[in-house]
Image (tube, rainbow, N blue to C red):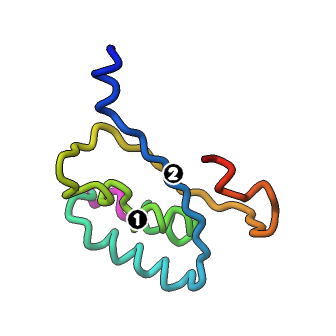
Amino acid sequence: MSTTQTSRYVRIRVDLMLEVSDSGALTRAAIDHIDGDDFMPDEERGYARDAVRDDEAEALAHLIDPVSLVEGVPGVELAKASWTSEGVAYDPDADDWDMDDDL
């Protein structure tokens, strides 16, 4: 692929650190989202409900859609997307959590 062809593609990396301040509200919202998802097969709903009850990161994964960040942006088309959500041990004062170092 030539430089001209590859220069049309832009990778955007975003790291977010979220603090869950109300686990119950998060879980309820995720379950409501699952129950209202017309595209989720019925046989997957029970598994999804159990997963969000057990794991806050899983609940967030059902509620946050990074693809929506670029929907409607003029002149761009999403070529590929990937994201993960995981629980982490976080110390805001530790040097290894300084996200600016990655730039």
Q: Residue furthest top?
A: 1
Reply yes or no: does residue 87 show up in magenta.
no
Of 3 and 48, nearer the camera is 3
Q: Is residue 17 left or right of residue 33?
A: right
Establish if 64 lies above or below 10: below
Q: Considering the image in quadrants, where does the N terminus appear? A: top left
Query: Which residue is the site of mark 2?
Result: 84
Q: Residue at 36% of width from left, 60% of height from top? A: 65
Q: Is residue 43 left or right of residue 49?
A: left
Q: Which residues are magenta?
A: 41-45
Amino acid tagged 1: Ile
Establish if 75 lies above or below 8: below
Q: Is disc 1 surrounded by few (<14), some (14 to 19) or many (20+) residues within 10 Å?
A: few
Tell me which corner region of the image, top left, top right, bottom left or bottom right, holds residue 96: bottom right
Q: Residue at 40% of width from left, 79% of height from top? A: 29
Of 21 and 2, nearer the camera is 2
Tell me which corner region of the image, top left, top right, bottom left or bottom right, holds residue 41: bottom left
Label number found at residue 64: 1
Amino acid tagged 2: Thr
